[in-house]
């Protein structure tokens, strides 16, 4: 039965725009960010006579000032002056879903779950539930503009996302405000039709989106029907079709386009999303989760991307993390029954609830991060006359996918400082940074995890100290050690020495056969260590490894960038060949 809707603008007092000049008082502040007064030692924000307690953020969540601006908190209870902290401020400009599954409700839940401070501008009010959409009330453009002024003129944003923009005038209003306030990070989820098939936007909206909003967009996230609508009804039936659609949509102005493939009816067990950033096409693949709890998936994914962008990640890394987030959320929501209709929502609280001992509680570790594993060495840097910073910059430039900081003769203060130096380079690019052995340094510096050996703190104890979300790697030589490390909570294993190595001359060699036995014994990724270089790393991939860990082969040569690229190319080629051989 077709869904009949009437899009209405308010004609009564409900549509009046009430003005209160008190809402527009500006405190002199960089980029519109407010100074919020804290009146006691419980770290409370005092604003407009209301007190809102906030949870202190960990040091590792703070990004450098040149990546995003800090919200300043001035303490009136101490004589030590002002202190600063950083919040990823994320604004959703979208419609309200009375059923709570999609729209601004899903957006705000996602922003919270991903560590953002969510704010909202309501463009429309919908009456909907698990059975579909029963009505839509359009918020007048004057009120949309006033909401945007209230937020952008006072609180400021690190990233803004748009969802349901029901009329061409709404699109123009939002676009004008983006230009007025100079918002540089914008995620556009072109919501045109609801999950149940009801129109949520007037027919002219797609054309105005293309002309006004897409040129301001950082990441565009259409599903297949939305991509088709933006491309004049084009038929998109395959991954190659998606690739071409992403390229053609990119030509309309967005910095990057993510075409979502969930609607492909090809019977595949994996869902493939296609991203194009003007230089290369990237596929993001994940398992297809069999569940009816899919209401709000588009809103959730785009909000997760926006929150990750607000935290300083690159578009590609923001998409990768958000894809992992939505896949895990679908899994955890698959048994929830809400309502009597066919479109059930997800339960975002499942992503913030503690799951003690549950491996699924940890953020999914991407084995692709292990492909070119660079391990720093101060002796190599000294020999080649390079600083640690320069060496890591060159390695990442060439293709290093993860960096481990290894320092054996350095005090804790300098170790933490060195770790933070690497973080400044790696984190905005989504490159994980680990610390060798020193859990205390990892905690102090706020890096992504640690790598420990058999004689270091036990993996289970490291997991207890670091919590569920940090990466833990463990060095092993035997299948028995590998299985125990996996059971104790390791995310990956480093196994070797595979070949004789000068870096650890006293390390016994297990060879390729020993490496094969380790890979076959566990269900977590293994990286080869010891004597690995660009010429032999492919052999370790053939026996089951996800990548190779290199020290002198990257940092002890004239060009770390060239060396890292050679390793990554060899690994990627071997992974493709291994996949081809197994299919």
Image (cartoon, grey):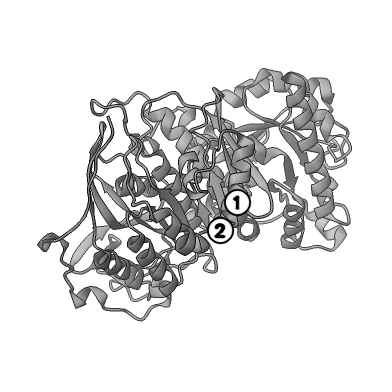
Query: Considering only vertical position in the picture, is 37 above or below 257?
Result: below
What number of labels is visible? 2
**Dot 1 alpha-carbon crowd within 10 angstroms: few under 14, some 14 to 19, many 20 or more:** some
**The N terminus - image quarter:** top left
**Residue 185 at least partly seen:** no
Residue at (72% x, 53% y) in the render: 396
Asked if the residue at tag 2 contacts the one at tag 1, i.e. Cβ–Cβ closer than 8 Å, the answer is yes
Q: Position of residue 5 (x, y in %)?
A: 24, 43
Q: Disc 1 to disc 2, how far (Cα)?
A: 7 Å
Q: Residue 272: give x, y in percent of width and height.
A: 57, 34
Q: Is residue 464 above or below residue 40?
A: above
Query: Compared to 174, does 465 lie above or below?
Result: above
Residue located beneath label 1 in the image: 248
* Disc sitting over residue 252 in the figure: 2
Mark 2 closeness class: few <14, some 14–19, many ≥20 residues within 10 Å: some
Which residue is outermost to the left? 13
Q: Nearer the viewer, residue 200 or 48?
A: 200
The quadrant in which the C terminus is found is: top right
Asked which quadrant contains residue 578, the reply is top right
Residue situated in front as seen by the camera: 575 or 460: 575
Q: Mark 1 falls on what kind of element?
A: helix
Q: Identify the element where label 2 is drawn.
A: loop
Residue drawn 43% across the image and 50% down it: 190
In-image side of 121 versus 451 (left or right): left
């Amino acid at each position: 039965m077709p869904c009949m809707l009437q899009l209405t603008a308010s004609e009564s007092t409900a549509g009046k725009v009430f003005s209160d000049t008190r809402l527009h008082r500006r405190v002199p502040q960089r980029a519109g960010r407010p100074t919020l007064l804290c009146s006691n030692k419980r770290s409370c924000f005092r604003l407009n006579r209301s007190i809102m307690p906030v949870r202190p953020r960990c040091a590792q969540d703070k990004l450098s000032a040149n990546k995003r601006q800090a919200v300043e908190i001035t303490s009136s209870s101490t004589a030590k002056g002002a202190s600063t902290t950083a919040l990823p401020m994320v604004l959703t400009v979208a419609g309200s879903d009375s059923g709570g599954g999609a729209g601004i409700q899903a957006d705000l839940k996602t922003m919270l779950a991903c560590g953002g401070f969510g704010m909202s501008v309501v463009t429309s009010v919908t009456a909907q539930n698990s059975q579909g959409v029963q009505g839509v009330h359009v918020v007048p453009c004057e009120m949309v503009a006033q909401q945007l002024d209230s937020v952008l003129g006072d609180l400021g944003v690190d990233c803004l996302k748009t969802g349901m923009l029901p009329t061409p005038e709404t699109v123009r209003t939002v676009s004008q405000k983006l230009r007025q306030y100079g918002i540089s990070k914008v995620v556009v989820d072109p919501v045109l039709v609801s999950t149940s098939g009801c129109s949520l936007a007037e027919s002219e909206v797609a054309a105005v989106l293309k002309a006004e909003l897409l040129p301001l967009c950082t990441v565009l996230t259409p599903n297949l029907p939305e991509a088709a609508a933006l491309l004049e009804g084009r038929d998109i039936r395959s991954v190659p079709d998606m690739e071409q659609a992403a390229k053609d949509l990119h030509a309309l102005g967005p910095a990057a386009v993510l075409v979502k493939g969930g609607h492909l009816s090809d019977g595949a067990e994996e869902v493939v999303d296609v991203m194009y950033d003007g230089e290369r096409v990237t596929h993001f693949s994940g398992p297809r989760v069999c569940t009816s709890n899919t209401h709000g998936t588009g809103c959730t994914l785009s909000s997760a991307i926006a929150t990750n962008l607000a935290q300083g990640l690159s578009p590609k890394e923001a998409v990768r993390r958000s894809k992992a987030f939505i896949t895990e959320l679908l899994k955890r929501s698959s048994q929830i029954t809400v309502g009597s209709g066919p479109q059930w929502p997800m339960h975002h609280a499942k992503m913030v609830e503690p799951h003690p001992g549950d491996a699924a509680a940890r953020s999914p570790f991407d084995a692709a991060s292990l492909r070119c594993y660079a391990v720093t060495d101060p002796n190599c840097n000294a020999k080649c006359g390079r600083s640690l910073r320069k060496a890591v910059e060159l390695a990442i430039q060439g293709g290093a996918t993860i960096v481990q900081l290894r320092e054996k003769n350095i005090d804790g203060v300098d170790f933490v400082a060195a770790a933070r130096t690497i973080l400044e380079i790696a984190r905005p690019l989504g490159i994980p940074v680990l610390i060798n052995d020193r859990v205390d340094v990892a905690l102090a510096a706020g890096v992504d995890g640690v790598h420990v050996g058999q004689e270091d703190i036990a993996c289970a104890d490291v997991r207890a100290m670091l919590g569920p979300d940090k990466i833990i790697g463990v060095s092993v030589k035997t299948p028995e050690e590998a299985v125990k490390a996996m059971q104790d909570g390791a995310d990956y294993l480093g196994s070797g020495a595979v070949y004789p190595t000068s870096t650890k001359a006293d390390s016994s060699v297990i060879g390729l056969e020993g490496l094969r036995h380790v890979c076959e014994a566990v269900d977590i990724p293994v990286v080869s260590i010891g004597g690995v270089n660009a010429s032999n790393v492919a052999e370790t991939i053939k026996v089951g490894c996800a990548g190779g860990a290199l020290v002198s082969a990257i940092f002890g040569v004239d060009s770390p960038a060239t060396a890292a690229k050679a390793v990554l190319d060899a690994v990627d080629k071997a992974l493709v060949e291994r996949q081809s051989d197994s299919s």
